[in-house]
Image (tube, rainbow, N blue to C red):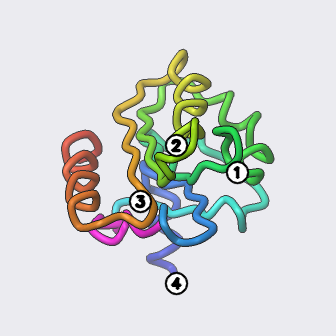
Amino acid sequence: MLMKVARILTCKKVILIYSLKGNTRGILNEINLNNYNLIDISKCENLNLTQYETILIGTSTYGRGVPPKPFFKFKNELLKLNNKKIGLFGSGNSHYEYYCGALDLLEELLKKDNEILFKYKFESYPNTRAKEEFNALVKEWCSD
């Protein structure tokens, strides 16, 4: 327990995720999560991101291309981000007008004051190729 608390306090990377059906979370199966704190925003009450240098945000898209409701609870915290390295990823359905539109919206909101490392969109539950591509992006952009 003490080691887990120490890691949480010293970790400089976090993954914020919302994955109602498990599709977006499925892309993390190939990632070494030991270097990240993982926060499911649907189960989170408070969010303080000031201690993190790198923030990966994963979400699915619903409706007309907006992030799911839990993101709106932390909108002000996200808008306060400054000088962070941010990677965006998420699942969607390309049959809709706004394929993974939540990622596009988050990118627009965050790119002014932060560095967007990548934006990775994939269809439904990630296949092996999508997992490999995402893993390569994370290794390239988020390695220490």
At label 4, the amino acid type is: Met
Q: Between tags 1 and 2, which lies in front?
A: 2
Work out how far the residue at label 1 is from the one at label 4, CA to CA, in angstroms: 32 Å
Instruction: Write down the region rendered in magenta.
Output: 25-34
* Residue at position x 67%, y 59% in the image: 41
Q: Position of residue 49 (x, y in %)?
A: 60, 44
> Which circle's residue, 2 or 3, is located before the other in the chain?
3
* Contact check, label 2 and label 3, Cβ < 8 Å: no
At label 3, the amino acid type is: Tyr
* Contact check, label 4 and label 3, Cβ < 8 Å: no
**Residue under numbered circle 1:** 68
* Residue at position x 37%, y 43% in the image: 120
* Contact check, label 2 and label 4, Cβ < 8 Å: no
| Farthest front residue in view | 95
* Residue at position x 56%, y 26% in the image: 110
- Count of labels in the image: 4
Q: Is residue 32 rendered magenta in the image?
A: yes
Q: Between tags 1 and 4, which lies in front?
A: 1
Q: Mark number for residue 1?
A: 4
How would you rate the neighbour count of disc 4 (Cα within 10 Å): few for under 14, some for 14-19, many for 20 or more?
A: few
Q: Secondary structure at mark 3?
A: loop
Q: Between tags 1 and 3, which lies in front?
A: 1
**Residue under numbered circle 3:** 36
Q: Between tags 4 and 3, which lies in front?
A: 3
Work out how far the residue at label 4 is from the one at label 3, CA to CA, in angstroms: 16 Å
